[in-house]
Amino acid sequence: IHDASNALILVDAVSSAGGVPISVDAWGIDVVATASQKSWISPPGISMVTFSEKAWDAYALSTTPKYYLDMAQYKTYLEIGQPPFTPCLPAMYTLEVALQSMVDEGIENVFARHHEIAQHTRDGAKALGLDLLPDPQFASNTVTAIRLPEGIDGVAFLANVNRDYNVILGGGQKSLVGKIFRVGHMGWVEKAHIDEALKAADETLKSMTS
C-alpha cells in the first residue's frame, strides 16, 4: 500500500493485540488501535493506539475539529506521565497487573499459549463434524468462527446454549448473522473452558436436529 500511495495503514487490533505478534514498524503500520478488554485480560474502559511518524505528520495537516480525541493532547500529557482527562482507574490498575503477568510469562510464551488453545478449539470443532469459517492459515489465534449446519436457526441456537448451559457464544455479524458462531480464546481462557463451550454447542445442535 505504501509503495502505491500515500495512504495510511490503520489496523483494528482490538481482539488480536496482546495475543498474536504484530510487527508494527516492520510491517509499516501507521496506526494500531486496540482495547483493554480482549487479549490484555482486563475490563473494558481503555483504548490504546500507536502512531507512526507518518501518522503524526498527517495529523498535523488535519483540519477536522477535535477535543476529547485530540491525540496531540495525549502526546503532550504522555511526556509528563499523565492523561489529559480522568481515565477509568479500575481498568488501568487491572491492566497494570495484567501487563506485569504477561511480562512474567514472557511475550513469546503468551503468543504460543494463544496458538495452542486456538488449535485445540479448531480440532475440537472439527471433531464434532463442524466446519470452520476462515482458511486456517489466516485465522486469528484469539477467536474461532465456526459454521452452523444447514437448517439451524443461528439466533435460536445461541439463545438455547445460553439458556440451557449458561454458556455465551458469539454470533455472526452482518451477512453472517445466524450462519456461524464464534468462540473466543483470548486472555486467560483454558482448554477446559473451550471443551465446555463446544460440548454445550454440540448438545444444543443435537437437540435442535432430533
Image: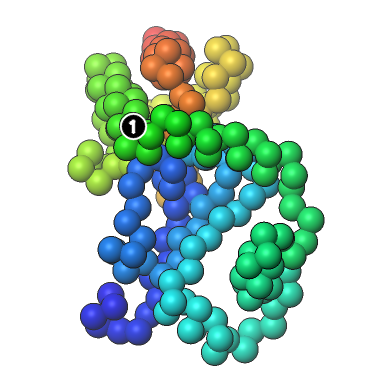
Q: Nearer the viewer, residue 106 or 129?
A: 106
Which residue is found at the position 68% from the left and 39% from the top? 93
Location of residue 20 in the rendering, given as x and y in whole percent from the top left corner: 35, 43
Crowd tier of the residue under label 1, counting other residues whose Cα lies within 10 Å: few below 14, some 14–19, many 20 or above: few
Is residue 90 shown above or below 49?
A: above
Location of residue 118 in the rendering, given as x and y in whole percent from the top left corner: 32, 30
Q: Which of 157 and 13 is in front in this view?
A: 13
Q: Is residue 147 visible?
A: no
Numbered disc total = 1
Is residue 7 shown above or below 194?
A: below
Q: Name the residue under label 1.
A: 109
Q: In which quarter of the image is residue 81?
A: bottom right
Residue sticking out furthest to the front: 80
Q: Which of 151 and 53 is in front in this view?
A: 53
Which residue is found at the position 73% from the left and 39% from the top? 90
Location of residue 129 in the rendering, given as x and y in whole percent from the top left corner: 25, 20
Q: Is residue 67 visible?
A: yes
Quadrant that contains the C terminus: top left
State the colouring used for the structure image: rainbow
Is residue 189 shown above or below 141?
A: above
Quadrant that contains the N terminus: bottom left
Which residue is found at the position 32% from the left and 56% from the top? 23
Left or right of residue 16, residue 140 in this image = left
Which residue is found at the position 54% from the left and 19% from the top? 167
The amino acid marked with disc number 1 is: Asn
Left or right of residue 42, residue 22 in this image = left
Is residue 183 shown above or below 210?
A: below
Location of residue 34 in the rendering, given as x and y in whole percent from the top left corner: 51, 52
Q: Is mark 1 on a helix, strand or loop?
A: helix
